[in-house]
Image (cartoon, rainbow, N blue to C red):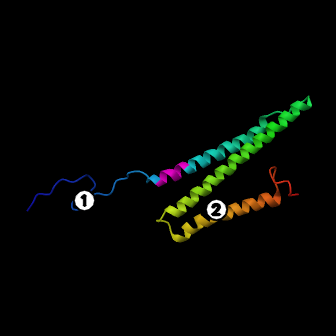
Amino acid sequence: MQPSLPSEPGVSPGYPPSPRYVGPRPRNVVVILLFFLAGLLLLVGVVVLQARVLVEPPTGNPPDYTAWARTIRVMGFTGLLLLNVGVFFFLVGGILVGLFRSDLPDTVRRSMIVMPGVLVIIWLLGFLLVGSAFAPPFIP
């Protein structure tokens, strides 16, 4: 009879040790960075839109008013652009997760690929039907 060898604490003799955590897979790091960038863009976009309130309107000359109006317009455009790019990154991240995560059920994966397209269509219809500050001039 052979003597039993000492094993690691918490491991029963004769059983292999449980696998150790080695960190996220490389493609998960890309998705995590994409979601972090998207969240950061959304945060900055909201801050820029809220900061328009802090720019006080001028009280005197018309050239001052024109410069103020341009500043407000540029800040609005920049804030909305950052928000749109952030949402785009979230949609791309969802599609990447749906494409590459084979451990998810098929219905979840399909919905993660199809629903971003549906959201973009609804978003564009909302801009075209409701209108916005940056709508094309042919829309009333």
Between 3 and 24, which is closer to the camera in this rendering?
24
Disc 1 target residue: 12
Which stretch is magenta?
27-33
Q: Gap in Å between the C-alphas at discs 1 and 2?
A: 48 Å
The reply to whether residue 82 is in sight is yes
Q: Position of residue 10 (x, y in %)?
A: 28, 54
Quarter-wise, where is residue 129 in the image?
Answer: bottom right
Screen quadrant of the C terminus: bottom right
Mark 2 element type: helix
Q: Position of residue 56 (x, y in %)?
A: 82, 33
What's the amino acid at mark 2?
Answer: Pro
Q: Tag 2: Cα neighbours inside 10 Å, few (<14), some, or many (≥20)?
A: some
Quarter-wise, where is residue 48 in the image?
Answer: top right
**Residue drawn 54% across the image and 66% down it:** 109
The reply to whether residue 58 is in sight is no
Q: Tag 1: Cα neighbours inside 10 Å, few (<14), some, or many (≥20)?
A: few
